[in-house]
Amino acid sequence: MKTKKILFSALLLTAVVVGAMAANDPTLMKINGKKVPLSEFEYMYHKNSDQQMQPLSLNEYVDMFVNYKLKVLAAEEAGIDTTASFRKEFKGYRNDLAKPYLRNQAVEDELIRKAYDQIKEEVHVAHIMLPLGANKEEEAASFARLDSIRNEIYNNGQTFDVLCEQFSIDNGSKHNGGDQGWIDGQRGLPYVFIEKCYETPVGKISDPFATQYGYHIVKVIDRRPSKGQVQARHIFKKLMGDYSPEDEAKVKAVMDSLYTALQNGAAFEEMAMKNSEDGTARNGGMLGWFAPAQMIPEFSDVVFDLKNGEISKPFKTRFGYHIAQRLNSKGVGTFEELKPQLLNTIQGDERSNKAELARLEELRQVYKPTVNRSTLKKLDAAIVANEGLDSVVTSDPKIRSLEAGKAGNRKISLGTVFDRMPKSTKITPDAAVKMVEGYINRQLDGEVLECEIDHLAETNKDFSNLLKEYRDGILMFEISNRNVWEKASQDKAGLEKYFEENRHNYSWPGQKYKGYVVYATSDSLLTAAKDYLKENSFAGEDLAKALRTQFPKDLKVEKVVAAKGENPVVDAIAFGGKAPEEKGRWKYYFSPVGKLISAPEEAADVRGPVTTDYQNYLEQEWVKSLRDKYKVDIDQKVLKMVK
């Protein structure tokens, strides 16, 4: 009873909040009888004012806002908001906008703080890794073996190094005692691995645990405060595969000569670009900023021991030989400085859903997802009668219409659950109901989140305004595309008519060459095209189509309208210019038809400017028709309340 009272009080408080919001949010305008609250206008007004180079006056913005709402109304009357494509796009935006509200902020803040504490300390670790099992029995066997290895070290005097070489499948470290070097929270390892490293005391070995790569135990060798980060660059020469001592000697000799050149004043960046054998060469060997844990230990140890500006002697790592220069250094940043980076890291690994799961658990207490047990009994009976679950059951209309469960005011049917289940062969009765119940619970969790998003849209003014902005923006774009942008590009007759009526607005300072240029990959193909046109007479686009059909490969046709200096080929053809240097495939060209014109003859000659002007014309005419069609009432008293 106490719980019911608390829930009722929460709902009553929500109603009071919504009522207060409505009372403090008067109607600014009505568009065709549809109310627009003051808060929606103020939200859009201030947002757009902040983005404008020259902010509009209030009256100018009112006029623009009314046009915007008229277009949205036109989109609604056209039924765009009911289409499947709109609903899908809008729901995607809606769910993305809701994400920050569907995380437990306290949990997220704790994760960020923990991640910051981890990068302030580095841990030197080694590990033994066994392969992932194909089934539960193999998994249990691997965990048992790791437990046995751990016991041998602790109780029977075996060494970690020896057992690592004997059992570990990590070929990169098994021969050096499983050494992973110094790690921190930014290393890029699975988070469960990092967490085990920080949880395990120095000199101790962790319990067995799993990552996506295998099963592990971790030994913590040492801990130290973070050394911060350095900025460095390097010159790198590879040692490939099973290299011989002679191969290594040659690489070492090259690196020694490069080091001597650097000592004698050669530019490091230039030497790296010419000699380095990795992807950093193009950037002068630049590696950027990194912490010790972000590089292999044998590289980090050398670079972090250098002074800023100092260049190392050639040194060897497991990949080859390096010459490194440390350029700069810095300590660990403050929590506030690193918070965005840490949040991004958390959202990219297995910690990403912890805040969401914590919030979901809270919302389950509010919206009470419940599986309909009577439905499960009926489903069980149908499955038993059918001797299993298959399409005979999942396509039965009576079964599909049964209520599977509810959350808040949302209900789901068995049909929607079946539709989300994988299509498979017949499932035995024992496993079927349990599997279906799992899918019901999963879908109910989704409905819990939908309930909360609906609640946010009703009670959270910021979310509501942002959501409405996205919704109306999608509608306005689609209706504008239909009536203006797409129409202007496809309505050739209308575009040509507009050009004829406004020809005086389009002029050039000088002549332009208008015609066709034919390009070919060989002189013989160009000659063949010329001969073909001598034997066949074509005009305009027919000429281009005929050539493309007759010579589908290694020949292209371009329509050109170009002034002197705008196109080197046209300059050579029409303005006495020097033939351009032959480059690429299209070295050979001629113009079968063309002429100099002093002004545009058709819309296509000035397609860009005419299309833009025609779009503006269509926009103006459309808005005028909307103003005539729909009544707009603006409450001037409320308008004076705009802050």
Image (spheres, grey):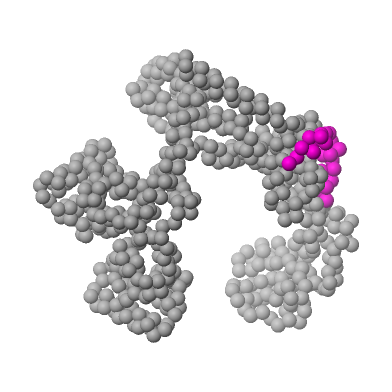
Residue at horizontal 73 percent and vertical 81 percent from the top: 577
Residue 628 painted magenta: yes
Considering the whole magenta stretch, tell me its main secondary structure: helix
For residue 384, above or below residue 635: above
Residue 546 placement, left or right of 225: right
For residue 626, above or below residue 581: above
Outermost residue, left side: 156
Residue 453 point in image, percent of width and height: 56, 32
Q: Report the front residue among 34 and 265.
A: 265
Residue 404 point in image, percent of width and height: 48, 21
Q: Report the front residue among 245 and 340.
A: 340
Residue 436 point in image, percent of width and height: 42, 26
Residue 567 placement, left or right of 177: right
Residue 393 point in image, percent of width and height: 45, 22
Q: Report the front residue among 599 and 112.
A: 112
User: Which residues lie in the magenta part?
Assistant: 617-643
Residue at horizontal 25 percent and vertical 57 percent from the top: 179
Residue at horizontal 74 percent and vertical 76 percent from the top: 565
For residue 247, above or below residue 640: below
Number of residue marks? 0
Is residue 402 visible to the viewer in this orientation of the structure?
no
Residue 38 placement, left or right of 343: right
Using the rendered view, name the quadrant where residue 552 is placed: bottom right
Outermost residue, bottom side: 264
Is residue 586 visible to the viewer in this orientation of the structure?
yes
Residue at horizontal 55 percent and vertical 20 percent from the top: 9
Q: Which quarter shows the C terminus?
A: top right
Residue 11 painted magenta: no
Q: Report the front residue among 534 and 37.
A: 37
